[in-house]
Image: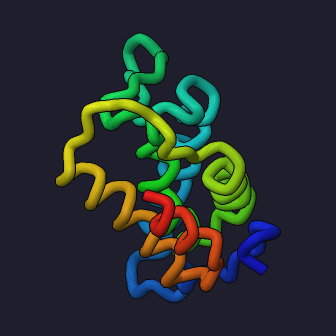
């Protein structure tokens, strides 16, 4: 159940690739997402040198949203659940900010629609409609 953060393997284990390299990519994603959660959770992006979050896309949590499909496909259930719950509880478009239509479309609309397509979780459609 997507709302509970339960994701299938996402097919990642069946990707035709060198298993050592495939697993190294998954571990790199897990590590990068962990650092984002630690230092910049809810911000649009992490500045790795200063270990601070930055809002360059209106403070919409662009990295959280952008990561949903990758977390799902890689079967990173715990990380997906936290990201999904952040979107459900914290993502709000009730802001006064200057938005890039391009960035908002590819990162926010695209991320939410990809997450819906993979999970079937209607919450994502509600957020897109909100936007």
| Quadrant of res 49 | top left
| Vertical comparison of 117 with 99: above or below | below
Identify which residue, 63 or 12, lies in the foreground. Answer: 63
Image quadrant for the C terminus?
bottom left
Identify which residue, 58 or 2, lies in the foreground. Answer: 58
Side of 131 where 9 appears, left or right: right
Q: Is residue 24 visible?
A: no
- The residue furthest top is 50
Q: Position of residue 6 (x, y in %)?
A: 77, 73
| Vertical comparison of 131 with 118: above or below | above
Q: Position of residue 66 (x, y in %)?
A: 42, 55
Side of 65 where 57 appears, left or right: left
Residue at the image point whose x is 55% and y is 45% from the top:
92
Instruction: Identify the colour scheme used.
Output: rainbow
Q: Position of residue 23 (x, y in %)?
A: 52, 64
Residue at the image point whose x is 61% and y is 39% from the top:
34
| Quadrant of res 77 | bottom right
Residue at the image point whose x is 63% and y is 78% from the top:
122
Image quadrant for the N terminus?
bottom right
Q: Position of residue 78 (x, y in %)?
A: 74, 57
């Amino acid at each position: 159940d997507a709302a509970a953060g339960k994701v299938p393997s996402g097919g990642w284990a069946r990707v035709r690739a060198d298993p050592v390299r495939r697993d190294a990519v998954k571990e790199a994603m897990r590590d990068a997402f962990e650092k984002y959660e630690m230092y910049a959770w809810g911000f649009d992006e992490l500045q790795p040198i200063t270990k601070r979050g930055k809002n360059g896309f209106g403070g919409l949590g662009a990295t959280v949203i952008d990561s949903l499909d990758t977390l799902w496909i890689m079967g990173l259930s715990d990380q997906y659940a936290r990201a999904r719950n952040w979107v459900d509880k914290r993502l709000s478009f009730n802001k006064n900010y200057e938005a890039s239509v391009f960035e908002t479309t590819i990162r926010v609309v695209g991320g939410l629609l990809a997450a819906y397509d993979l999970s079937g979780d209607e919450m994502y459609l509600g957020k897109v409609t909100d936007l």
